[in-house]
Image: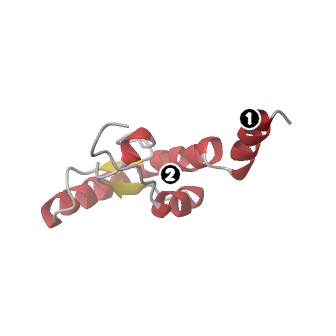
Amino acid sequence: MPPGHVAVFHQRCLSSWPLEWPVVFTPSSDLDEYLQDGVEGLRIATATPDDLAEGLTRAWSLVQHGHWDELSRAARLRARTRFDHRVFGRSLRSFLGL
């Protein structure tokens, strides 16, 4: 991991994705490794009010144009394929040789 890189995976993703709720996120942690802007969530440059307003405006535009459901389905799929307890269980059993 590069110096200064903070590896933090936010609980909001783990609690939001299974409910098919995409997240608005900043690059302040390792979320870029798990989220694709415009696929499972919306990336904003910083956590400033202006950037958050831009992200929420972008989210509303997706709702109005019928694309929010696509993000919702992708968020749920990401949760199932990357963070489901069965995925971790298989990896752990394989690592332990079980």
Image coordinates of residue 67 in percent, x first then y, are 41, 46
Q: How many marks?
A: 2
- Reading the image, the residue beneath label 2 is 72
Q: Which residue is mark 1?
A: 95
Name the residue rendered at 73%, 41% in the picture: 92
Q: CA distance from mark 2 to mark 1?
A: 32 Å
Q: Quadrant of the N terminus?
A: top left
Secondary structure beneath dot 1 equals helix
Residue 51: x percent and y percent?
A: 17, 58
Tell me: residue 61, above or below residue 15.
Answer: above
Q: Residue 8's spot in the image, x, y percent?
A: 42, 54
Q: Disc 2 on helix, strand or loop? A: helix
Q: At 56% across and 44% down in the image, what residue appears?
A: 78
Tell me which numbered mark, 2 or 1, is placed earlier along the sequence.
2
| Relative horizontal placement of residue 98, taking residue 31 as reference (left or right) | right
* Left or right: 33, with 88 as reference point: left
Q: Single out the mark in the foreground, 2 or 1.
A: 1
The quarter of the picture where residue 60 lies is bottom left
Q: Quadrant of the C terminus?
A: top right
Q: Are marks 2 and 1 in contact (CB under 8 Å)?
A: no
Horizontal side, residue 16 vs residue 45: left or right: right
Q: Residues within 10 Å of mark 1 (few under 14, many from 20)?
A: few
